[in-house]
Amino acid sequence: MAGRADMPSHVHWELTYSCPLRCVHCYTESGRRPSRQPKPDVLLRIADVLVSMVPQGLKMIGIGGGEPLIVEEFPRIADRLTQGGLNVFVNTSGYGLTPELAAAMTSLFAVHVSIDAATAPVNDWIRGRKGAFERALSALAILEEVARTRRESGHSPLRFGIDAVLTRDSFDDIPRFLSDICGRFTEMKFIFFGAVIPIGLASRETYESQLLTDEQLRLLADDEFVSRMKQYARPDLQVCFSDNLMFQMNPSRQEFPVITIEPDGMVRGLTAYEGHVGNILNDSPDMLWRQVCALREHPFVVDQLSSVRTPSDWAAAARAIDRRFASPKELIRLSKRPPYVPKPD
Ligand code: SF4
């Protein structure tokens, strides 16, 4: 395994599995499973454990879900983490974002609003709820206003932008994202385009038609394509493209030193895949990280991931790893996943 880190520098914390959306590619099946959201004191205890990991090298916490902004304690949790020395960013669909909450979120490193297509009909289809596109744009407008007010009054900036998951239905939307959507928000700092990752609901065999083609994946790393796309954006907007292969945990690739924590503190062994190595509230971070590292070198995992060449291979490996390491309860959930139904023309 290349580049083994002594401890994780990043934590991805899924704060709740409750979500108002039903995205067809949802990695966590949020909204379709129990929220597993613990009581406020438990969430704050998890935050305290994360802060205790700062001297060991933890730097960044990404808070997602589910929809983290519907968790009432979110501002307190974010404050506790940032005051403890961590950079905290949040991924939100925009649901639950109010002007008051946006104004209270200024200690955050960044706010990422997810939009998955540049038009309402396609976005709302992907996200499983009519009105999701307008809701995300409203959230961006709120963040724009707060960011402008802060800049004009000399306060620390509010860094916000868009996370867009690229699927075959939305790949050609890149220019429209950059000109039409980003063009409306002059305070916006970034847009990150990432290839859909074939895990969770996106690992279903029936979803393969939406995984990017080899050519689309190649383009995301092609300098000429990237600079051509950037011409659609204003010059000061940070525009990033990623094939997201770092989330594969492929033994032949440089390791991404991240662990994923579920709402109640359970730690996933393989970040993107099913299966646990313990709970951050009961087990020492050192022991958990050792377990995570050991699992990444498990012969079954190495065998499955070493032969991955295409997004479809990756989806098949994800299904096999999920089945191998999921608990009996998780296996029941996996077996009940409905097939993906393509968008009607
Ligand atoms: S907004 Fe995120 S958590 Fe909610 S259904 Fe969509 S992908 Fe899943």
Image (cartoon, helix red, strand yellow):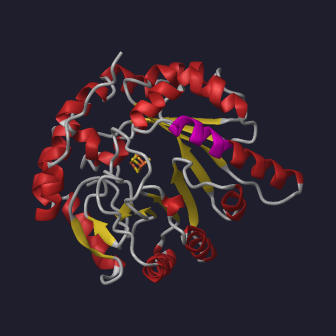
Q: Position of residue 248 (x, y in %)?
A: 29, 46
Q: Nearer the viewer, residue 119 or 59?
A: 119
Residue occupying image coordinates x 38% and y 29%: 167
Q: Nearer the viewer, residue 27 or 278?
A: 27
Q: Could you tell whether 146 is left or right of 22 in the image?
A: right
| Quarter of image, res 199 | top left
Residue 138 within the segment the image draws in magenta: yes
Which residues fall within the magenta stretch? Answer: 131-140
Residue occupying image coordinates x 26% and y 25%: 209
Quadrant where the C terminus sits is top left
| Quarter of image, res 188 | top right
Q: Nearer the viewer, residue 2 or 154?
A: 154
Q: Position of residue 87 (x, y in %)?
A: 58, 64
Quadrant where the N terminus sits is bottom left
Residue 230 within the segment the image draws in magenta: no
Position of residue 123 relative to residue 45, above or below, is above
Position of residue 216 relative to residue 112, above or below, is above
Residue 103 appears in the figure: yes
Q: Position of residue 211 (x, y in %)?
A: 30, 29
